Image (cartoon, rainbow, N blue to C red):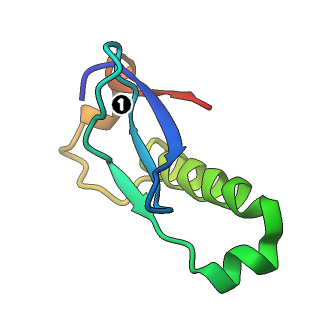
Amino acid sequence: MKESYLEIVELENGDIVLRPASEDGEETVPLAILQIPDDTRSYLKNRYFELAKCMFHAGIDFVYSEDTFFDDDSDYLDDEEFRPKILH
């Protein structure tokens, strides 16, 4: 993926998605989808979205960490040009 900004948004159906931010306002295809059940949402109250942000950040940190579990031959994760930026 070329350099792009990522956004974390809650869709009308309640799914929370991580997706590339669109410059023209069109919806983009999500990279990841998180579904939080209603009982968990009521337990967490308004903090469920903070939980989702932490989970997505943990996943991004894992993918771009120095301790990757990918093959030594895969050098695409080392290229700074392709690392996404995150928007909230």
Q: Please state the horizontal and vertical placement of residue 59, each as a whole percent of the image.
A: 50, 55
Residue drawn at point x = 29 percent, y = 26 percent: 26
Q: Please state the horizontal and vertical placement of residue 43, each as a whole percent of the image.
A: 80, 80
Residue 82 drawn above or below residue 66 = above
Q: Please state the horizontal and vertical placement of residue 36, each as a whole percent of the image.
A: 56, 73
Residue drawn at point x = 36 percent, y = 60 percent: 69
Give the quarter of the figure containing the C terminus. Answer: top right
Residue 32 drawn above or below residue 30 = below
| Disc 1 residue type (three-letter) | Asp
Q: Please, what secondary structure does the residue beneath circle 1 have?
A: helix
Residue drawn at point x = 81 percent, y = 68 percent: 45
Q: Residue furthest left?
A: 73
Crowding near the residue tagged with mark 1, few <14, some 14–19, many ≥20 C-alpha atoms within 10 Å:
few
Q: Nearer the viewer, residue 27 or 32?
A: 27
Give the quarter of the figure containing the N terminus. Answer: top left
Q: Is residue 36 left or right of residue 28?
A: right
Circle count? 1
Q: Is residue 84 left or right of residue 82?
A: right
Q: Residue furthest bottom?
A: 39
Residue 37 drawn above or below residue 58 = below
Q: Please state the horizontal and vertical placement of residue 80, each as a whole percent of the image.
A: 39, 20
Q: Nearer the viewer, residue 29 or 75?
A: 29
> Which quadrant would residue 50 be assigned to in this image?
bottom right
Residue 63 drawn above or below residue 20 = below
Residue drawn at point x = 25 percent, y = 35 percent: 75
Give the residue pinned by disc 1: 78
